[in-house]
Image (tube, grey):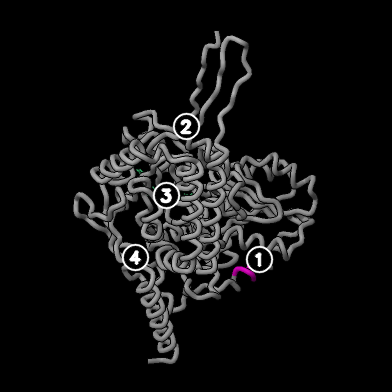
């Protein structure tokens, strides 16, 4: 055996041992469906495997729920809603949400480790997620107290007022890229205003949501949150078309969002959709280039590029393009691509081998079209990472803006670069995609920054930074990136319906 292969075998074994030890500590013993406060098997008895994308090993075997399980969960949710939950005061709900936040904080390191094992994100980024999860529950704990109706101006014949009432039972479907954070974005506002919930996690990453239910089992009345794990068509679709579900909140791809919308139409069910993106990041010639390079690295490589709002189309002004791209390529090549459980790792594996194939298909398409690969576009050649779903940080130049790799969401560590000189042409191109989730502007000229912010068709604009989403700041998309806003008070409005009460005074 050569020295190289000995050291790679050693590296591979080290990773395997580290992951096995971590999994033994943090994977919940019970990964069944959580319905009416009970852990149970799926009606069909079927299960599926969730794998560690770093090692390829099976982490756990959760239940594959189906429409019967969704029926059970909806019944359990209505039962507790009708019997007790709808009578809880805002103060009671505030206390509950604050306790959930405390439990997340108390177990933050275990949650972060489990998220890294199940999703592959670097542990340093998983820790950021957990801080945001706790903060979202605290933000919406506060919101329980200000879900106010109005007394309306009227004449002396009538007294008119409005109430903001919960829907009753709501369905929530989440993706795999920020598993626990997406659950928090949905659960916290829904519970804050008194809904009961049936939640379906992504089949790729169900474990942190199941762990959350273990940690808060004694905090919530049985049935207020029900978790049905399983696949999209078997467990997700019945939830979106269920007549007992009064509102559906979905986060995922635009393609599935379209299906959700059609199914929700069956019962005219209220929906919010948080969908995909293909966001532009614009760099002006007056930018501080070193800082702009760091912002660009965050924009595209944070969470391994598996970020709905990733700044995946980079618009560089002609005056700085060459210098900027040289610096950016160097910074991308210097990113540490390694075992995500290591503190030093900056880019982990993608979530599944299927997602690697999807990313590599886009890369191949760009290559065939004659695009120039400034860096990356491959799987790493480190043998120790061979079992993992890794893709190197990739920058693509000289690609047509109509190419499928530019128009569609790759959802990986891949950024396409464009040169601009004329402002209006650049803005037209920046807006020339079906999506409108986010955009970034990097310049020291604040007038220009505000002009671009107004002209960009996107729900979230970052100026001189990227990927910053604290609780309290509305997040959501224009165009095919979605309907509605999360992470802020608007979400409270989305989880309530207005009742008008008009009383005669004569
Ligand atoms: P996906 O659309 O494939 O799946 C999302 C969820 O929908 C999963 O739980 C899946 O099981 C379920 N599902 C699949 N088919 C379904 C159906 N027919 N009916 C009901 N549910 C169904 O998305 P994904 O690959 O898990 O996640 C990546 C996508 O999520 C990306 O497009 C990303 O941009 C998007 N996303 C958006 C936001 C946002 O806030 N806008 C945030 C995170 C992720």
Whether residue 434 is visible here, answered yes or no, is no
Q: Which element type, helix, strand or loop, lies under badge 2?
A: strand
253 and 410: which is toward the camera:
253
- Answer with mark 4 or mark 3, whichever residue precedes in sequence: 4
Region rendered in magenta: 328-332
Q: Going 52% across and 17% down the picture, which residue do you hit?
A: 502
Q: Which residue is mark 2?
A: 165
Whether residue 287 is visible here, answered yes or no, is yes
- The answer to the question of whether label 4 and label 3 lie on touching residues, with beta carbons closer than 8 A, is no
Label 3 CA crowd tier, 10 Å (few <14, some 14–19, many 20+): many
Q: Which residue is mark 1?
A: 328
Q: Nearer the viewer, mark 4 or mark 2?
A: 2
Position of residue 486 measured from the top left corner of the image (x, y, whole percent): 53, 44
152 and 172: which is toward the camera:
152
Whether ligand 1 has any atom under 8 Å from the Cβ at mark 3 is answered as yes
Q: Going 53% across and 40% down the picture, which residue do you hit?
A: 491
Q: Which residue is mark 4?
A: 28
Label 2 CA crowd tier, 10 Å (few <14, some 14–19, many 20+): some
The answer to which image quadrant residue 62 occupies is: bottom left
């Amino acid at each position: 055996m050569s020295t190289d292969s000995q050291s790679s075998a050693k590296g591979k074994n080290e990773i395997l041992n580290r992951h096995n030890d971590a999994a033994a500590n943090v994977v919940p013993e019970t990964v069944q469906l959580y319905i009416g406060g009970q852990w149970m098997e799926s009606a069909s008895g079927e299960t599926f495997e969730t794998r560690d994308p770093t090692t390829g090993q099976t982490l756990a075997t959760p239940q594959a729920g189906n429409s019967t399980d969704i029926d059970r969960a909806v019944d359990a949710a209505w039962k507790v809603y009708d019997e007790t939950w709808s009578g809880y005061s805002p103060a009671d709900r505030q206390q509950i949400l604050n306790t959930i936040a405390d439990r997340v904080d108390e177990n933050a390191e275990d949650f972060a480790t489990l998220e890294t094992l199940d999703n592959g994100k670097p542990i340093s980024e998983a820790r950021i997620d957990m801080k945001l999860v706790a903060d979202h529950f605290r933000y919406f704990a506060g919101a329980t107290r200000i879900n106010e109706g109005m007394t309306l101006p009227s004449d002396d014949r009538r007294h008119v007022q409005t109430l903001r009432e919960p829907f009753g039972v709501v369905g929530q479907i989440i993706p795999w890229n920020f598993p626990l954070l997406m659950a928090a974005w949905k659960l916290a506002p829904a519970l804050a205003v008194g809904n009961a919930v049936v939640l379906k996690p992504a089949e790729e990453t169900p474990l942190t949501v199941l762990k959350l239910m273990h940690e808060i089992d004694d905090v919530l009345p049985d049935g207020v949150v029900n978790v049905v794990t399983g696949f999209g068509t078997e467990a997700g679709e019945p939830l979106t078309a269920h007549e007992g579900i009064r509102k559906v909140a979905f986060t995922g791809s635009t393609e599935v969002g379209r299906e959700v919308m059609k199914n929700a139409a069956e019962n005219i069910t209220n929906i919010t959709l948080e969908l995909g993106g293909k966001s532009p990041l614009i760099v002006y010639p007056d930018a501080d280039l070193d800082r702009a390079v760091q912002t660009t690295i965050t924009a595209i490589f944070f969470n391994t590029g598996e970020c709905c709002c990733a700044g995946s189309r980079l618009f560089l002004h002609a005056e700085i393009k060459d210098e900027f791209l040289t610096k950016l390529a160097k910074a991308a090549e210097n990113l540490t691509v390694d075992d995500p459980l290591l503190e030093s790792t900056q880019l982990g594996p993608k979530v599944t081998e299927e997602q690697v194939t999807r990313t590599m298909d886009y890369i191949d398409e760009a290559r065939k079209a004659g695009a120039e690969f400034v860096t990356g576009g491959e799987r790493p050649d480190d043998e120790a990472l061979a079992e993992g779903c890794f893709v190197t940080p990739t920058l693509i130049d000289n690609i047509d803006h109509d190419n499928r790799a530019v128009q569609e969401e790759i959802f990986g560590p891949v950024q396409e670069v464009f040169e601009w000189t004329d402002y209006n042409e650049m803005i037209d191109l920046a807006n020339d995609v079906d999506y409108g989730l986010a955009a970034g502007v990097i310049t020291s000229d604040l007038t220009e920054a505000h002009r671009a912010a107004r002209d960009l068709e996107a729900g979230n604009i970052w100026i001189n930074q990227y990927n910053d989403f604290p609780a309290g700041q509305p997040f959501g998309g224009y165009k095919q990136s979605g309907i509605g806003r999360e992470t802020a008070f608007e979400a409270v409005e989305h989880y309530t319906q207005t009742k008008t009460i008009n009383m005669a005074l004569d």
